[in-house]
Amino acid sequence: MAKTACAFAALALLLATKPATADETPAYKSTPRVHAHAGLAHAVGTPQGGDFGFGGAGAVAGELPIFSCFSAEVAAGGVFLAPNDPAPGLPPRSTATIAFFTGGVRFHPRPRMGPAGPWFGGGAGLALNGSAPRFGANGMLGWDFALREGSIAIGPMAAYTHVVEPGTARQAEADAHVVWGGVHVSFGGRRRDPIAGPPPLGPDADGDGVADADDACIKTPGVRTQDVNTNGCPADDVDGDGIPNAEDQCPQSKGEKNVDPKLHGCPPPIVKEDDDRDGDTVPSSVDACPDEPGQPNADPELNGCPIPQEPPADVEIE
């Protein structure tokens, strides 16, 4: 039903507007508003168009949204017209006054614009022509511009007021037809929907905006990339190991920090299980005697070497 109402409103205004759909969520939330209309007025038709000159008109209305583009509305207002000079021999006319109290609807064909953009509507109800009660109706349209985040909207408007004069054979001539236009101002809601922000980040140890779970260089601030191997790493770190290329001795291979400048940024040496030719549990790469079983020793020159045997002491025979 809401889509049908929006589509009808757009068609009636001859605007290239399609109704809001599930994929076109309104950018503003519809909330109640108060409207004020004021402007110049003039009667049209015969004989009122000649009997009366320019005057003024105004109305105050309250809007209660039903759908994003459709609202119920109640309004109260009035019109006054200054009399023209009567023809010779006729008594002078007095100022014409019309007060009206109506209920009706208001359409916003482009609800994504919130309080700004086109609108139109109308209503019907009681009209007092002087002190005599009559049936009356109003139609209005305009285009507003939003101010202060939509809490105020202002723009040009035009309206037509019709008051029925019952009990006359020349109904078209007896009815009052008044056109008026001027400025429309509205106050109230139509708050903009909050824009969903990015999901909260998880822990971010280096504070670079890349969560630790996605950061290839957790402890080094970097930049976001599409490569899981470099995401969160410095821009000048090709292998993504957190060590800048200028300091990395192996810039194409992800490595680790090392106090030895020649090994800084390089992968640790791979020790094979069978890399112990002499079987003394000391890897051949650090075994000073790789082909002779020995024992671990803190001295690199003796590590993995046999413990030297002291020669036996000479035995003296008496």
Image (cartoon, rainbow, N blue to C red):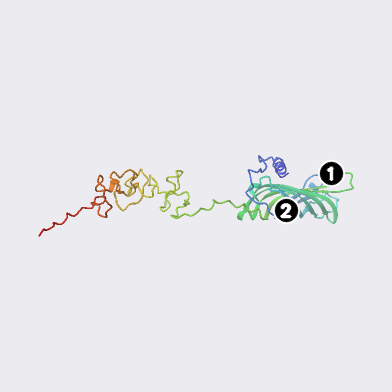
Q: Is 57 displayed left or right of 270 in the figure?
A: right
Residue depicted at 64% across the width and 55% down the height: 152
Q: Is 150 displayed left or right of 83 in the figure?
A: left
Q: What residue did someone put label 1 on?
A: 172
Frontmost residue, 151 versus 38? 151
Q: Residues within 10 Å of mark 2 (few under 14, many from 20)?
A: some
Q: Is 215 displayed left or right of 192 in the figure?
A: left
Circle 2 or circle 1, nearest the eye = 2
Tag 1 or tag 2, which sits nearer the N-term? 2
User: Residue 18, percent across and down?
Assistant: 66, 40
Frontmost residue, 104 versus 178? 104
Residue depicted at 85% across the width and 47% down the height: 174
- On-image quarter of the N terminus: top right
Q: Which mark is residue 64?
A: 2
Above/below status of 14 relative to 148 = above
Q: Residues within 10 Å of mark 1 (few under 14, many from 20)?
A: some
The answer to whether any part of residue 140 appears in the image is no
The answer to whether any part of residue 194 appears in the image is yes
**Kind of residue at disc 1:** Ala
Residue depicted at 78% across the width and 46% down the height: 44
**Callout 1 secondary element:** helix
- On-image quarter of the C terminus: bottom left
Q: Is 306 displayed left or right of 174 in the figure?
A: left
Q: Tell me which corner region of the image, top left, top right, bottom left or bottom right, holds residue 151.
A: bottom right
User: Residue 48, percent across and down?
Assistant: 81, 48
